[in-house]
Structure formats: C-alpha cells, structure tokens
Amino acid sequence: MKAMLLAAGRGERMRPLTDTCPKPLLKVRGRPLIVWHILNLVKAGITEIIINHAHLGHMIEELLGDGSQFGAQLRYSAEALALETAGGIAQALPLLGDQPFIVVSSDIYIPHFNFSECLNTLEDNDMWGNPHPLDKRDVAWLYMVKNPSFHPEGDFALNLMGLSNQGKEGEPRLTFGNIGVYRPEMFAGIKAGEHAKLAPILRDYADRGQLGGELYSGVWHNVGTPEQLAALNAPLNGPLNKATTQGKPT
C-alpha cells in the first residue's frame, strides 16, 4: 500500500511562521510534523509515500530528499497553486497506482497512530466475510475523532454499516480526522490540475452507503495556530492545550 501526505496548504492561520516555512515543516517536540507521519508509516511497513506541495514546496523537497534517511521512498507532486484536497489527490493518481492508498494531512499531530491498521480496511468483503456486490463496497474508510467544542455537530454519523450524513437518533456524530484510505476510482472524474474539494465527494458516497469509518481515540491535534503549536511544545510537565482544531474535509 502507498500513502500520500497532503502538504500543499498555505497555512494562513499559522502566519507569520508560515511566511518563511511551509506548515508541514513546523516542529512539534523537535521533529517536523510531516516527519512524524513518515516515520510512523515506515514503522508500519508503508514505505512508498507521495507528497504534494505548493507554498515553499522546494523547502520540503530539500529537507526530506528521496526519503532514504527515513527508510522511505518519497516522490513529489508539485502544484503551482494548491488544488484543494481532492484536486491534489487526483493530480497524484499516476504516482499512487490502482490500489487503495492512505491519505493524511501533514499538519495534524498523531504521534501514536498505527498505520498498519489501514492495510485491510477496504477488503472487498462484508463483516461476515462474504464478498460485497461491486456497487456496495466501501470506496473510502475514514478515521473519525470526537467533536471539538466549536464543532459539536460533527461531520458524519457512525453506525454499524458505516458513515452517514443524516444519522438516526442516538448515533454518534463525529469529526473527520483527516486520515483516510481511498480507492483511486473516487477521483477518476477529476482532471489533472483541476481544483476540487473532498467534502462533496465524501458526502455523495455517504449517501450511497459506501463510506466506512471508525473512531480514533488516540492523541490527535490539528495544529492550526501558533498558540496551539506553542502549547504542544510546552514542557511535558507543563500545561498542554488539548483542544483540537476543526478536522473537516476540504
């Protein structure tokens, strides 16, 4: 399985830090955010990694190189202007291949996420081991997190059959954690270089009953502001701001 790290965002709310440093290279606990992901992917045996970039992208390539220092094989998908999440994935499809792949936003901090759990999420069998009809199989598997206080309505409802836009009473609504596994056909209708958001595509497949997911309850921070970055880098015995930023798909 291959993985893609999304690193093309401008990081406006992180300014002025991101005026001279791409957001994925900002450090948490002495290590760039994007390097946390690379190391954890390699630990899970996922070594073929594609990184898209736009703003100050040359700095990302200069620091990470070909990935050999991490035991990875890194390839880059450069964007003159950021193409949004779905547009960036669509442009990178020739590098990602024809099998399901992992996509992670580079600006989230998930130091303990076990990427080996992603390897079999899109097997073409139902929960009883029976083959799915082709038109009913999940096209994506999303890792959800509990809603932050400022986004209490969440993004999707989670039930036994997967994720839905309109959940029934009592079904928990959760926020997309910007970690997902996708089938490449999800993005086949997007032309290379076309700007496209991910959220409408996910909602469409949720309506079809083809969006799977689960709750991730480990450490998860969407590092959105200099204040949040400073809180994460505070001494371990000091106060740590545990608030997360909104993880909605874009």
Image: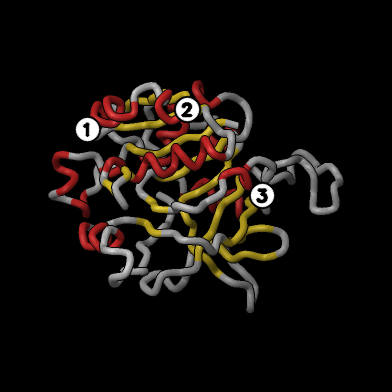
Q: How is the image coloured?
A: secondary structure
Q: Is residue 64 left or right of residue 203?
A: left
The secondary structure type at the circle numbered 2 is loop
Comes first in the chain, label 3 or label 2: 2
The secondary structure type at the circle numbered 3 is loop
* 49 versus 22 height, above or below: above
Crowding near the residue tagged with mark 3, few <14, some 14–19, many ≥20 C-alpha atoms within 10 Å: many
Q: Is residue 80 left or right of residue 124?
A: left
Q: x and y percent of residue 14 in the render?
A: 21, 52
Query: Which residue is under mark 3?
Result: 210
Q: Give the number of the mark in front: 3 or 2.
A: 2
At x 23%, y 60%, the residue is 230
Q: x and y percent of residue 23 in the render?
A: 27, 44
Q: Give the number of the mark in front: 1 or 3.
A: 1
Q: Amino acid at mark 3?
A: Gln
Q: x and y percent of residue 247 in the render?
A: 41, 57
Q: Amino acid at mark 2?
A: Ala
Quarter where residue 139 is shown: top right
The residues bearing labels 1 and 3 have C-alpha atoms spaced at a distance of 36 Å
